Amino acid sequence: MQNDRNQPVGDRPNWKPETLAVAAGRPDRVPDAPLNQPIVPASTYVGGSTTDLVGYGRYGNPGWTALEDTVAALEGGSRALAFASGMAAVAAVLAAVPADATIVIPEHCYLGVAGLADEYRQRHGLTVRTVDIADTAAVLQAADGADLVWIETPANPTMDVADLPAIAAALAEGCLLLVDNTFATPLLQQPLTQGADMVLHSATKFLSGHSDALCGILVFAADTDADLVARAESARKLHGATPGVLECYLVLRGIRTLPVRVRQAEASAKVLVGLLEDHPLVTRVRYPGFGSMLAIDLPDAATADALIDNLRLWVHATSLGGVESTLERRRRWPSELASVPQGLVRMSVGIEHVDDLAADLLGGLDRVRA
Ligand SMILES: *Cc1c(COP(=O)(O)O)cnc(C)c1O
C-alpha cells in the first residue's frame, strides 16, 4: 500500500490490523526503492510546486505522512496528525475547540490532560466537567450541553473501563467524542468504529514500544468536520508541536511489530493477573480483561515501595507500553489524585518470558510479606 493520505478509507485493501501494521505507510513499490520510508531531515523544500505544497519543515515531512497513514489505517480513520508528544496532540485538541467550550473529562485520566484542561479553564474560559467514565449514566448527564466528551479507557491508573458504544450512541449530535486509546492500542479497541470522532495516542507508549521516542497522534473519523481537522493541523503548525523525523521513523518501526508485542504482553498479563489474585498481600487486582496494563492495590505505600525495591527484572519507571516490564507506585507523584490509593502499583507487562516475570514478582511479594 502506498502513502495514500488523500484516498478515502474505502479504497484501502480490506486487510486485518496485523497486516496493516506491516504493510501500510510504505514508499511506492518501484525498482530499487527502499522498503521503508527513509528519514528525510528537511527544514525547507525547493519551491515551485503547484500541487501538494509542503514548503517548510514545520508544515510536513514524508516521514510524518508514512506514520500518519499507518495509524489512520489501523484505527479505521480518514486522516491522522502526528505531534511532538501525546501532550502536544492533547494541546492541539484543546486549541481546536472553541475557547468557551464545555468539555467532559475523566475523573481519573492522564494527569497532563486534567492539568492542561484546567489551564484552559483559567486562561481561556473553557468549562471542564469531570466524571467517572465507568458510569455511563453519569457520563451522559455530564455531556448534556457539552461540546466534547473526552474518554480514556482503560483509564490511567485505575483501569476504569467505559462503555464506548453506549456513550457514542447516546451523545447529542453536536457533541464530539474523543477517546485516548493509548492503553488499548488499535489492536484491542478501535473507538472510531464504535462511534468516536477522534482517537488520541501517546505514541510514546505501545505504538513506539521501545521506550526510546516521544510522539503523539490524533486520528479523525471519516465524517469529522474538515474545519476541526484544519484547526488541529493549524495548532500543530503555529504551536510548532511538530514531531521529530527520527521519532516518526522509530514509532513506525515499532508499529511493524505492534500486533505480536500486544498479543504476547496480553497473554503474559492474563497469567500474572491469575497469580496476583491468589497472593495474600494483594488486596485488589485491577485488570480490564484485555491488554497488558494492570494495577494492584497493596496495603500501603511502604509495602508497595518495598515490593518495587525487591524486584530485579521489573523496572521501576513511569511510562508504559515498552518491551520491558515496568511498574510504579503512582502516588509517588505529588500531583497524583488523592483518590488513587497510596499502595496502588501500576504495571505495564512487557514481552519477557512470563515465567521470569512471575518468578520475580511473586518472589518480591513473598520477601516483602516475610
Ligand atoms: C503518556 C500518556 C499521555 C501523554 O503522552 P506523552 O507522549 O507523554 O506526551 C496521554 N495519555 C495517556 C493515556 C498516556 O499514558
Image (cartoon, rainbow, N blue to C red):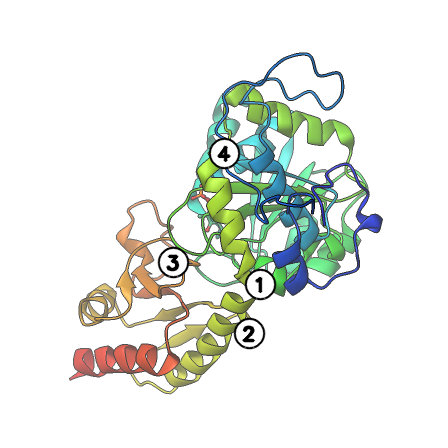
Secondary structure at badge 2 equals loop
The numbered mark, 2 or 3, whose residue comes first in the sequence reads 2
**Cβ atoms at labels 2 and 3 below 8 Å apart:** no
Q: Is residue 178 visible?
A: no
Q: Position of residue 160 (x, y in %)?
A: 53, 62
Density class for disc 4 (Cα within 10 Å; few <14, some 14-19, many ≥20) is many
The vertical placement of 53 against 74, above or below, is: above
Q: Mark 4 or mark 2: which comes first in sequence? A: 4
Instruction: Identify residue for label 2.
Output: 289
At x 52%, y 67%, the residue is 262
Spatial CA span between label 2 and label 3: 20 Å
Which residue is the site of mark 4?
A: 243
Proximity of marks 3 and 4: CB atoms separated by less than 8 Å: no
For label 3, the crowd category at 10 Å Cα-Cα, with few meaning under 14, some 14 to 19 and many 20 or more, is some
C-alpha separation, residue under disc 4 versus residue under disc 1: 30 Å
- What is the three-letter code of the residue carrying label 1? Val
**Callout 3, which amino acid?**
Val
Quadrant location of the C terminus in the rendered image: bottom left
Picture coordinates of residue 358, whole percent (x, y) = 33, 81
Of callouts 4 and 1, the N-terminal one: 1
| Whole-percent x, y for residue 159 in the image | 49, 63
* Amino acid type of the residue that numbered disc 4 sits on in the rendered structure: Pro
Which mark's residue is nearer the viewer, 3 or 4? 4
How far is the residue under mark 3 from the one under mark 4? 32 Å
Report if the CB atoms under discs 1 and 3 are less than 8 Å apart: no
Residue at left offset 57%, top offset 42%: 37
Determine whether the beta carbon of the residue marked 2 sits less than 8 angstroms from the nearest atom of ligand 1: no
- The answer to whether 107 is drawn above or below residue 39 in the figure is below
Query: Marks 1 and 3, Cα distance to the nearest angstrom?
Result: 16 Å
Q: Which residue is mark 3?
A: 340
Q: Earlier in the sequence, mark 1 or mark 3?
A: 1
Using the image, tell me which numbered label, if any, was put on residue 161.
1
